[in-house]
Amino acid sequence: MKKYFNLFDLSQKVDYKTEILSGLTVALALVPEAVAFALIAGLSPLTGLYAAFVMGLVTSILGGRPGMISGATGAVAVVIVALVQSHGPEYIFACVILAGLLQMAAGFLRLGKLMRLVPHPAIFGFVNGLAIVIFMSQLVQFQDGDGDWMSGRDLYVFGGLVALAMLIIWGLPKLTKAIPAALVAILAVWGIVVAFGIKTTSVGDMAGPGGIAGGFPPFHIPNVPFTLETLRIIFPYAAIVAAVGLIESLLTLNIIDEITETRGQGNREAVAQGLANTLSGLFSGMGGCAMIGQSLINISSGARARLSGIVASLLLLSFIMFGSSLIELVPMAALTGLMIMVAIGTFEWASLRTFNRMPASDIFVMITVTLVTVFLHNLALAVVVGVIISALAFAWDNAKRIRARKHIDEEGVKHYEIYGPLFFGSITTFNSKFDVLSDPNEVVIDFEESRVVDMSAIEALNKITERYQKVGKKVHLKHLSPDCKKLLRDAEEIIEVNVLEDPTYKLAVDKV
C-alpha cells in the first residue's frame, strides 16, 4: 500500500517558480474546458469545475506520473450524457463513484501492465486523432450565439487575437523560457482586450447566466436507492467510464513518459484515478481522467513535479470561490489560441513519414484508430479496435511462417522439423505438411524450433496422430518445451492427444 500513497518523491528536484507559473497557466485553461464538458454532459458548469478540482488535486498528489493533469474530460462526458438524460445528476454521482472503485481495483490487481499490449501504431493513431479532436473542438469558438460562423469585424477581431496568442506561444520560447509562453499569451491578449475595450467572447459568456461562482465542493452522498436495480442501471455506464478513463490516462502517461524521458507508474496512476473519481462523485463532480491537452500545456511550460498540478487545482478552487468575476473576463480568444497550439504540438507529425516505410498493417491500424477517435469521439473504442486489428495482423503474419523440413534417416525414420509457432492460425498450413499415406511406419515430429501455443494446436496434434494411427504408423514428438508439455498434460481430460511414444526410441526424448 505504501508505494501507492507516498505523497512526494523526495529525490525529485523542484523548480518552484516554473511549477507555480505553469500551474497558473493550467488553471486558467482548465476553466473553459471543465465548463464545456459539463455542458456537453447536460450538467451544470460547477459540476465540471468541482470534478476538475478534485481529480486534479488527488491525482497530482497520489498519481503515478508527476506533471500529468487530470480533470473533467470530454471522453467521460459523452459516456454519461445518456444517463443524465434518463435518470438525472444523482445517478451520475453514483456512477462516477462506482467507476472509481473499479479503477482502484484495476490498479491494485496490477492491470496497468496490460497497456503494453497497445501497439505503437495505435498510440500514434490515438494521439493524432486526439489532436484533431482538440483542434475541431476549438472551431465552435468561431461561431456566434446562434451557431452561425463569425464574419466581418467579429471574425477579424477574434481571429486576430487567436493568431496573436499562437504567435506568442510559438515565438516567446525562442527568446526566453523564464515565464511560460502560454501564460504570457493569455495575459497579453487579456491586457489588449481590456486596454482597447475590445468586445469579444469571454469565459463568462461560455459559462452562461450562472457563471462559475460557487463554494467549496459540497460533500454529498448520491440520492439514489441503494438497490440492485440502481446497480443494474449505473454499472454499464460505470464500467465504460472506468475503462475509458484508464485507457486515456495510461496512454497520456506513456506519452508524457516519452516527452520527459522518464517512467511513470501505471498501476499507481490507476489507483489514484479511481480514488479521485470516487471522491469526485462524493463531492458533486462529474468525474474524469487524465487530460492530454492540459498535461502537454503543463509539460511544455517546464513543469516536471507534482507541485504544478496541486497549484492548478488550488487556484481553480480559488477561482470558483473568490475570483469568478475576474476569471469570467478572460477572453476565449486567448484560450482558443492556446488549445490550437496544443493540438499542433500533440499531433505526431513524424508519423506521416512512416507511410512508405512501415508495414501496411501498421499504417492501417494508425489510420483506423485516428478515424475512430475523430468521428466517434470514443478513445477507448479506438484503442481497442487498434489492438484487435494489430493482433489479427500479427496472427495472420505468423500463420504463414510455419514450415517443415523433411528428411529420412539411415534407419528409415522420417523426420518433420517444424519451425514457426503452431497456433490456431497456422494449423491448416501445419496439417498440409504431412503425407500420411506415403510416410514410413515411424515418424518424428521435431519441435525444437517451434512452440505449441494454444488448444487449437493441441487439437491439431491430436488429429495428425489419429491419422497416422489409423494406418498403423507410429509418431514421436521430439523437443517439446516444458510449457508445451504442460499444455498437453492440462489438455488430457479434454482432448486425447494420440502420441504413440516408444520409451526406448533414442530420439523421442527431450534435448538436454
Image (cartoon, helix red, strand yellow):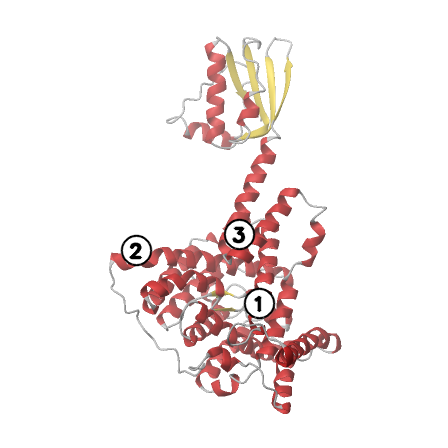
Task: Choose between 248 and 421: the one closer to the eye.
Answer: 248
What residue type is disc 2 on? Arg
User: Secondary structure under badge 3?
Assistant: helix
Residue type, numbered disc 1: Gly
Return the residue at label 1: 293
Tell me how far mark 2 sits from mark 1, CA to CA.
Answer: 34 Å
The one of 301 and 7 positioned closer to us in this rendering? 301
Q: Specify few, some or many for label 3: CA neighbours under 10 Å numbering under 14, 14-19, or 20 or more.
A: many
Residue plotted at (72% across, 52% down): 353
Closer to the camera, 263 or 208?
208
Eyeballing the image, is 451 above or below 367?
Answer: above
Above or below: residue 20 compared with residue 390: below
Amino acid tagged 3: Val
Please state the horizontal and vertical placement of residue 194, each as a whole percent of the image. 60, 89
- Would residue 264 be found to the left or right of residue 344 on screen? left
Q: Image quadrant for the C terminus?
A: top right
Spatial CA distance of label 3 from label 2 is: 26 Å
Is residue 479 visible in the rendered image? The answer is no
Q: Is residue 80 something one can see in this rendering?
A: yes
Tell me the tag on residue 84.
none
Q: Are marks 3 and 2 in contact (CB under 8 Å)?
A: no
Q: Percent position (x, y) of residue 51? A: 43, 71
SS for callout 1: helix
Rendered image: mark on residue 232: 2
Q: Residue at x 75, y 74 (%)?
A: 174
Mark 3 highlights which residue?
Answer: 383
Circle 2: element type? helix
Question: Gap between marks 3 and 1, in whole Å?
Answer: 18 Å
